[in-house]
Amino acid sequence: MASAYLKWKYRDVQPDAPAEQTRGQRWRNWWYYHKWHVLIGAALLLIGADWTYHALSQVHPDYQLAYVGSVPLEGDGASWVSQLAALGTDCDGDGETTVQVQQYLVLPDSEDPMYTYASNVKLMADLEARESYFFLLEDPERFQESYGVLQEDWFQVEDGLYLARRAFWEDRTAAHMEACDRLWERLRKEMA
């Protein structure tokens, strides 16, 4: 004879009928299990949209001027931007002549060595990437001695400031090289 335990163990068990849920209960149940998927997906979508916006709205300059000196240029070099833009041409076809001035300040060693080091690293990155074609320098001989990247035809434009251009010995050159060469010749004629 079967024991009471075996009768209970092998009884005919029917599953409970599923409870009918309202639309709100189904939504809360779905949200409980999928909220992190939705939030992470929304965050990734926002990051992707931000990257796309910045990539499409970034302005690439037609000409880039690197200033290397011990004192910042007045007005962030606005006079140089307007002068180069007036003499230059629109190289990338966006309808305007864009000039960007990068300032690399070289302070005397006693003031702030970390700032000088950081500025030097930025300058080295500019030289390696071949971003700047024009250089506005306080001491072109010392700059050429330190970096060896200039053509030897710089000229004085203001008291204590010299305009120089980059020399290229490899296949990699600056963007819009022909337009930069034409602007260099115009600048030499204007400054003479």
Image (spheres, rainbow, N blue to C red):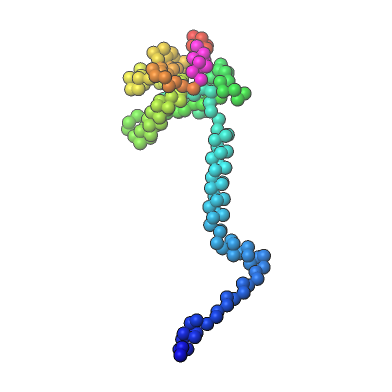
Q: Position of residue 148 (x, y in %)?
A: 35, 19
Residue at the image point whose x is 53% and y is 23% from the top: 62
Q: Residue furthest right?
A: 23
Q: Report the predominant secondary structure element of the magenta stretch.
A: helix
Range shown magenta: 176-185
Residue at the image point whose x is 43% and y is 13% from the top: 155
Left or right: 183 as drawn, with respect to 161:
right
Query: Can residue 70 be seen?
Result: no
Residues 160 and 120: in front is 120
Residue at the image point whose x is 46% and y is 85% from the top: 6
Left or right: 26 as drawn, with respect to 145:
right
Query: Can residue 76 be seen?
Result: yes
Q: Quadrant of residue 15?
A: bottom right
Residue at the image point whose x is 53% and y is 26% from the top: 61
Q: Position of residue 86 (x, y in %)?
A: 58, 18
Q: Position of residue 28 (x, y in %)?
A: 61, 64
Left or right: 121 as drawn, with respect to 9:
left
Left or right: 20 as drawn, with respect to 111:
right
Residues 157 and 122: in front is 122
Q: Is residue 173 above or below residue 13?
A: above
Q: Residue furthest front?
A: 1
Residues 80 and 178: in front is 178
